[in-house]
Image (cartoon, rainbow, N blue to C red):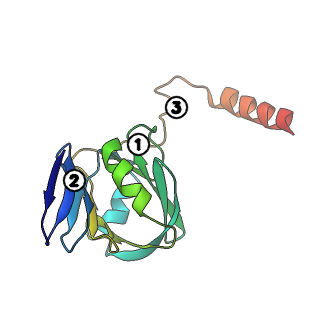
Amino acid sequence: MIYITQNVVEFVQKSQACIFKRFDLTVSLVAVDYSRPIRPMFEQVSRIGTIHSVFNKAMNIALDGTLLALLCTELPRMPNSVRLLSSVTKELLPNLRPGMEVRVGDDRLHIPAYNISLRLPQIPAWEPQPDITAYQWHRETVTTCLFTCTIRRK
């Protein structure tokens, strides 16, 4: 952990990522991984969304009628999600509030209130939809089981 304190900047650096900023410099972060549906959101022209909800290890961003999840690496992968190092989310999430503006597009997610910019890593996205044939699942069996379980709950 490195603390640099001047009248210009104060931030903490862990695991080669700037975590927290106080003044007028952009903090650039790179995600650990992301789901395939997220890439087009980042590639489009920047659009304005808002922070929908904030939790200890995750937050949801409302954008164009979709929720985008920002998760720590301690949580499993989820559709429409981007994961950050746990050390990053631990410092970042307590500072964010529902209703804050978020911009997504032009290859980044930007939180203007804290001047934080998040980019996707240069690795392939993971597919949030499993290939049923690869797991040798039988669609009829899965459908029957899901239907039976739903009826039992009611």
Q: Quadrant of residue 149?
A: top right
Callouts 3 and 1 close, C-beta under 8 Å = no
Q: Name the quadrant of the C terminus.
A: top right
| Residue type for callout 2 | Val
Q: Badge 1 is on which residue?
A: 127
Q: Residue at x 23, y 50 (%)?
A: 121
Tell me which numbered mark, 1 or 2, is placed earlier along the sequence.
2
| Residue type for callout 3 | Ile
Name the spot of residue 58 as percent of width and height, x first. 47, 51
Q: Residue at x 31, y 75 (%)?
A: 45
Say how many tags the image has: 3
Name the spot of residue 69 as percent of width and height, x first. 46, 54
Does any portion of residue 85 appear in the rendered image?
A: no
Q: Badge 3 is on which residue?
A: 132
Q: Is residue 43 above or below residue 71?
A: below
Relative to the observer, which residue lies in front, 113 or 152? Answer: 113
Q: Residue at x 57, y 25 (%)?
A: 137
Tell me which numbered mark, 3 or 1, is placed earlier along the sequence.
1
Which residue extends farthest top?
136
Relative to the observer, which residue lies in front, 84 or 35? Answer: 84
Q: CA distance from mark 3 to mark 1?
A: 12 Å
Q: Name the secondary structure under disc 1.
A: loop
Q: CA distance from mark 1 to mark 2?
A: 33 Å
Which mark's residue is nearer the viewer, 3 or 1? 1
Q: Name the quadrant of the N terminus.
A: top left
Q: Badge 2 is on which residue?
A: 12
